[in-house]
Image (cartoon, rainbow, N blue to C red):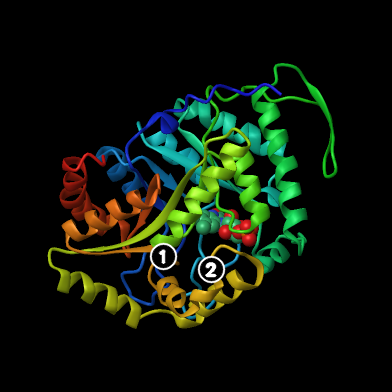
């Protein structure tokens, strides 16, 4: 099978990659009742994208979510759909890479491949794709879909889905497809993307990691304990080398950056004290029932981190302390991280003005 060229600017970029995560979802990454919690509407998302684009931030990653997590706030109950969100953001920005996130079971691969190709043309090749094989059972039920209990079937389906998309992006001629899940006659995809879109996958299970190693440019995984992360990254890169691939690892972080450490810690504490624990517990229960993304032996720590940052790595403190923590992620082997804030638009400018210059001085960006 021929592949389109892999010269996407995002893949050429050797800086420590910085992006944002989940700005399309109500609450963002903070499961909080605070009145200033994130409102995921278009105005806020556009304002954020323009700030990020101007500041030279590398990417924006959305979450594809169809059912919220309940609690008092129905965390992630209000979510902008990711293909349309990415389309509008790409049309309004100049440099930043914007990912769409697709659940394989909810998006036909021929349609999704063409959506991504269309976005590639609209954006001059700045679109990326996060492939989700599915884990959230209530969400599947809301879509009238059946989530297979076993990871083998989930990822076999995702593999066939992705093989079809990739074939459409690379084949000149129409082709037939006779697979386990899809039978297609004389299918083709025009236009094709100008460059192969960067692919993210965020699997935690061995089957999912196999999928990521075979297909993704980036595996996205939580950073709970950096010593473990280092081993995990080394192991993944070894697996990738075994199939002659190079896969980088990204993580997600939650920022509480203030001029003093006391102020930053007070902000974190206040967010935690105002957590929507009903939603947090639903989130943890669902993650642990159907997904293998978080280590199960660290439940207490994870419950707290789920409340502030949806399980993201805490970047808490002064600008120098936050820059130190970002450098620690880099030293553990991560290729980049997303950032989230209680209120992205209100808090990003302080990060931009104080943390980015330190990272530049240290040669990290
Ligand atoms: C950073 C990150 C982003 C993810 N984005 C989504 C998403 O947008 N929608 C979704 O349903 N699942 C999302 N997931 C879930 C993963 O795709 C995956 O299903 C989950 O981590 C469970 O892994 P497993 O399928 O190997 O058990 C994300 C996970 C992580 C860590």
- Is disc 1 placed on a helix, strand or loop? loop
Quadrant containing ligand 1 reads bottom right
Q: Residue furthest top?
A: 172
Q: Are marks 2 and 1 in contact (CB under 8 Å)?
A: yes
312 or 189: nearer the eye? 312
Q: Please determine whether, in this image, residue 138 is positioned above or below residue 202.
A: below
Residue wearing tag 1: 225
The location of residue 188, given as percent across then percent down, is 74, 24
Horizontal relation, residue 359 to residue 91: left or right? left
The location of residue 337, given as percent across then percent down, is 38, 50
Q: Residue at x 62, y 65 (%)?
A: 291
Horizontal relation, residue 117 to residue 225: left or right? right
Q: Please determine whether, in this image, residue 77 is positioned above or below residue 121.
A: below
Q: Residue at x 41, y 63 (%)?
A: 312
Q: Is residue 104 visible?
A: yes
Q: Which quadrant holds residue 314?
A: bottom left
Count of picture labels: 2
Q: Is mark 2 within 8 Å of ligand 1?
A: no
């Amino acid at each position: 099978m021929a592949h389109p060229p892999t010269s996407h600017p995002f893949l050429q970029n050797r800086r420590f990659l910085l992006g944002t995560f989940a700005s399309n979802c109500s609450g963002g990454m903070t499961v909080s009742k605070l009145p200033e919690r994130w409102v995921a509407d278009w105005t806020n998302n556009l304002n954020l994208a323009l700030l990020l684009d101007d500041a030279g931030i590398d990417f924006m990653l959305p979450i594809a979510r169809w059912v919220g997590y309940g609690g008092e706030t129905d965390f992630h109950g209000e979510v902008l759909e990711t293909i349309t969100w990415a389309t509008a953001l790409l049309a309004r920005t100049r440099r930043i890479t914007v990912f769409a996130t697709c659940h394989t079971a909810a998006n036909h691969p021929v349609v999704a491949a063409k959506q991504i190709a269309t976005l590639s043309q609209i954006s001059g090749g700045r679109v990326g794709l996060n492939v989700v094989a599915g884990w959230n059972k209530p969400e599947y039920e809301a879509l009238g879909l059946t989530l297979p209990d076993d990871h083998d079937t989930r990822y076999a389906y995702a593999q066939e889905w992705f093989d079809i998309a990739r074939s459409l992006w690379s084949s000149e001629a129409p082709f037939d497809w006779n697979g386990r899940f899809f039978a297609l006659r004389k299918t083709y995809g025009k236009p094709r993307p100008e460059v192969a879109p960067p692919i993210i996958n965020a699997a935690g299970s061995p089957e999912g990691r196999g999928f990521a190693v075979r297909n993704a440019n980036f595996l996205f995984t939580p950073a709970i304990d950096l010593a473990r992360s280092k081993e995990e990254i080394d192991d993944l890169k070894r697996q990738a080398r075994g199939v002659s691939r190079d896969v980088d690892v990204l993580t997600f972080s939650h920022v509480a950056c203030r001029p003093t450490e006391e102020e930053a810690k007070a902000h974190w504490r206040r967010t935690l004290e105002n957590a929507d624990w009903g939603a947090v517990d639903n989130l943890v229960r669902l993650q642990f029932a159907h997904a293998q993304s978080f280590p199960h032996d660290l439940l207490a720590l994870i419950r707290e981190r789920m409340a502030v940052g949806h399980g993201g790595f805490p970047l808490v403190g002064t600008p120098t302390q936050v820059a130190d923590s970002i450098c620690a992620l880099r030293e553990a082997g991560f290729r980049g991280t997303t950032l989230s804030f209680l209120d992205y638009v209100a808090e990003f400018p302080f990060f931009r003005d104080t943390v980015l210059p330190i990272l530049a001085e240290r040669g990290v960006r």
